[in-house]
């Protein structure tokens, strides 16, 4: 008797009954090339380690920790966008209201990153519905036994657009499926993912930093986990070097960067979590972030906030930092830093002479740049407000 | 379109479940032997008696939450997802998966009778899973009930198992015309009767030989004859111990016969553009 659960024996046995038929079994069944399949959205999962993040940080983690379903994750995103829209006085109920309307003048409206993302996803969903999904996404076959599972290598936006179509956009029929190029598990590659990521526009500097880290960790033999990781996972790459002989491949996968740029990008991992998240969400360039990686975490956050709020350039950021440095170097005699003492003395003495026009002119005379002057004054105002609030809090 | 074989005959006890389960396993084993990248086969049990489910999974306690019943009663949009959740591995082979039946299926049949679109309740979600299998094999209840209709609507190929004692060509033609009637009624041009499988053939009975000769000589039915399974007590033992015939006794005549039927089917799948 053949042993139970011995697949090879069984196959051999049937082979013996069928003799030469086996050699006739057409190549058809042996085709393991990469193929396009239409898969149920439920069987597809975004890659938790994908450097290009689509969802806001909190939703990203809750989704990948299994605390949110895809629909719930999108619902959270919609809620964040709705709150922002209401605050701007443009509340929306139906998601389709977010679609660009040629009759409306929308040039000046500055959307929050969440609104922008949602708007883009809806537009993508509607396009897919109207024109069909032109490009299949790339997924890795992680199927195990009867549990069919596919991990997205690239194309996560189309995945979320698919869910929008399925669960959110009323009146848009959807069969809940998505066209995928299925790659066998043993052929998945962080290098291919990196190339695809960097080949497209709009990879944020922080995403590039995560991408660089992932490649470095991989070539250094680190195991890449299958769950969402904290930034500390990527920061391990700060201590890693590019092993001999792999540099060209890494630079090419990063979209053809040079050695200097790669090291600048990598250094962005020095940013604290909050600064990183802000910078990623607002898609800040490496150029404006470069000089703040050495600051203390609070200062990083504050600078990033200012960069976002005032649209500072890399040069302007450097100037601000340089200024701070100069002033803090001179130590005062009182228990306050000298520059604060000077400012307070001056202001207290001449309080009645401080008025906006001359303040503007005086600042402008120093900085010779309206934008930068504006930034300084706003910052001054904010610091004053914070100081005043402090008093209130202590009462 | 993925080849989906339905074993059907409204006569009871003719070997539908025995054939469905052993052919399904045979396809897996042959494809693996041939080095196919995807040798997975899905066995769908649409018979509330759950015999095919029991022998392949060792269980017959599937109910409203984890069986074909859940798929049939689900909302249209959710059915495919639920199907993915209720499919289980078989105990026979890692590449043989089972969509289990449940006694609850009788109730589903009553509830769905006459509701719009009910004959498609299996075909629609199955269409989303079938592409991931090399083939799908469906076992049916001995009747032309709504569930059998659903199975036929979901299928590309009907195989009719038949005992030699029922071999009157008239009776067989009746089964075939019933299948054709369903095909035309529901406009499923993909469905065809692609095989007649003679089961429980006893060479010692002279009448069996005569009937088999008649069948082979028939201009239509003769071409459809896809195998002859001898009457073999190993089949009964296999059934009792929930084993495949190949494992129960690989040397038994029925093992060889089912092995060859599976071989013919695999060849057919390859040549008919089925995969
Ligand atoms: N070739 C065979 N030799 C001996 N016994 C067989 C053979 N084929 C089937 N049997 C036996 O006949 C009985 C009925 O077989 P099976 O359950 O496969 O038929 P069925 O058509 O599925 O029945 P039902 O209509 O009840 O679903 C079983 O006990 C089985 O073991
Ligand atoms: Mg049966």
Image: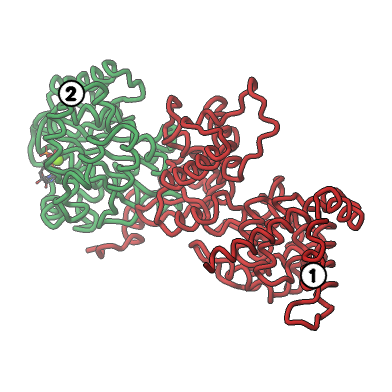
Chain colours: A red, B green
Chain assignment, label 2: B
Q: Which residue is mark 1?
A: A345
Residue B255 vs residue A329, the one in the foreground? A329
Quadrant of the snapshot with the C terminus of chain B:
top left
Q: Residue at x 53, y 41 (%)?
A: A81
Q: Position of residue B109 (x, y in %)?
A: 15, 31
Q: Position of residue A174 (x, y in %)?
A: 44, 30
Left/right of residue A38 with respect to residue B51 in the rendered view: right
Q: Residue at x 23, y 51 (%)?
A: B255
Left/right of residue B17 with respect to residue A45 in the rendered view: left
Chain assignment, label 1: A
Q: Quadrant of ligand 2?
A: top left
Q: Which mark is residue B175?
A: 2
Left/right of residue A43 with respect to residue A368 in the rendered view: left
Residue A54 vs residue A306, the one in the foreground? A306
Left/right of residue A357 with respect to residue A308 in the rendered view: right
Q: Is residue A85 above or below residue A69?
A: above
Q: Is residue B185 above or below residue A232?
A: above
Q: Is residue A162 above or below residue A2?
A: above
Front disc: 2 or 1: 1
Q: Quadrant of residue A221?
A: bottom right
Q: Position of residue A54 (x, y in %)?
A: 57, 49
Q: Position of residue B71 (x, y in %)?
A: 26, 39
Spatial separation of the CA atoms under disc 2 and disc 1: 105 Å
């Amino acid at each position: 008797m053949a042993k139970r659960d011995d697949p090879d024996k069984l196959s051999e046995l049937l082979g013996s009954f069928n003799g030469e038929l086996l050699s006739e079994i057409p190549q058809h069944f042996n085709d393991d090339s990469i193929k396009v399949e239409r898969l149920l959205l439920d069987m597809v999962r975004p890659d938790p380690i994908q450097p290009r993040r689509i969802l806001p940080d909190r939703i990203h983690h809750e989704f990948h920790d299994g605390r949110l379903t895809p629909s719930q994750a999108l619902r959270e995103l919609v809620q964040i966008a709705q709150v922002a829209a209401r605050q701007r006085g443009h509340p929306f109920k139906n998601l389709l209201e977010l679609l660009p309307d040629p009759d409306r003048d929308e040039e000046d409206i500055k959307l929050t990153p969440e609104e922008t993302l949602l708007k883009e996803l809806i537009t993508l969903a509607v396009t897919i519905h109207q024109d069909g999904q032109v490009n299949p996404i790339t997924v890795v076959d992680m199927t195990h036994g009867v549990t069919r599972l596919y991990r997205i290598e690239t194309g996560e936006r189309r995945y979320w657009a698919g869910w929008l179509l399925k669960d959110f956009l009323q009146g848009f029929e959807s069969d809940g499926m998505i066209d995928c190029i299925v790659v066998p598990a043993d052929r998945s590659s962080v290098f291919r993912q990196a190339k695809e990521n960097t080949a497209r526009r709009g990879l944020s500097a922080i995403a590039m930093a995560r991408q660089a880290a992932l490649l470095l960790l991989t070539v250094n033999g680190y195991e890449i986990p299958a769950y969402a990781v904290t930034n500390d996972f990527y920061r391990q790459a700060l201590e890693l070097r590019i092993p001999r002989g792999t540099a060209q491949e890494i630079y090419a996968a990063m979209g053809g960067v040079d050695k200097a740029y790669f090291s600048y990008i990598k250094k962005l991992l020095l940013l604290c979590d909050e600064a990183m998240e802000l910078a990623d969400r607002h898609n800040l360039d490496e150029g404006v972030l470069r000089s703040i990686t050495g600051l203390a975490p609070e200062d990083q956050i504050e600078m990033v906030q200012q960069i976002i709020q005032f649209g500072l350039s890399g040069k302007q950021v450097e100037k601000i930092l340089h200024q701070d440095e100069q002033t803090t170097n001179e130590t005062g005699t009182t228990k306050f830093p000298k520059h604060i003492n000077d400012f307070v003395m001056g202001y207290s003495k001449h309080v009645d002479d401080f008025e906006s026009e001359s303040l503007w002119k005086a600042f402008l005379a120093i900085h010779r740049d309206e934008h930068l002057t504006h930034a300084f004054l706003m910052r001054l105002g904010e610091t004053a407000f914070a100081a005043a609030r402090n008093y209130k809090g202590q009462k | 379109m993925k080849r989906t074989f339905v074993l059907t005959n409204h006569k009871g006890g003719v070997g539908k479940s025995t054939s469905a389960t052993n052919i399904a396993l045979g396809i897996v084993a042959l494809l693996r032997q041939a080095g196919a990248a995807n040798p997975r086969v899905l066995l769908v049990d649409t018979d509330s008696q759950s015999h095919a489910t029991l022998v392949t999974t060792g269980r017959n306690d599937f109910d409203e939450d984890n069986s074909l019943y859940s798929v049939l009663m689900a909302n249209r949009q959710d059915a495919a997802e639920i199907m993915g959740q209720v499919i289980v591995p078989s105990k026979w082979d890692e590449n043989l998966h089972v969509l289990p039946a449940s006694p609850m299926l009788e109730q589903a049949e009553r509830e769905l009778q006459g509701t719009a679109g009910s004959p498609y309740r299996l075909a629609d979600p199955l269409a989303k899973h079938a592409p991931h299998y090399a083939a799908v094999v469906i076992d049916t209840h001995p009747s032309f009930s709504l569930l059998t209709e659903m199975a036929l609507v979901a299928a590309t190929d009907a195989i009719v198992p038949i005992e030699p004692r029922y071999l009157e060509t008239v009776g067989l033609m009746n089964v075939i015309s019933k299948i054709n009637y369903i095909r035309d009624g529901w406009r499923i041009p993909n469905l065809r009767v692609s095989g007649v499988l003679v089961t429980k053939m006893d060479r010692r009975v002279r009448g069996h030989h005569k009937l088999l000769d008649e069948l082979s000589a028939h201009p239509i039915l003769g071409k459809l004859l896809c195998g002859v399974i001898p009457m073999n007590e190993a089949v009964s033992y296999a059934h009792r111990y929930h084993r495949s015939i190949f494992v129960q006794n690989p040397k038994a005549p029925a093992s060889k016969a089912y092995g060859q039927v599976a071989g013919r089917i695999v060849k057919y799948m390859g040549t008919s553009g089925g995969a």
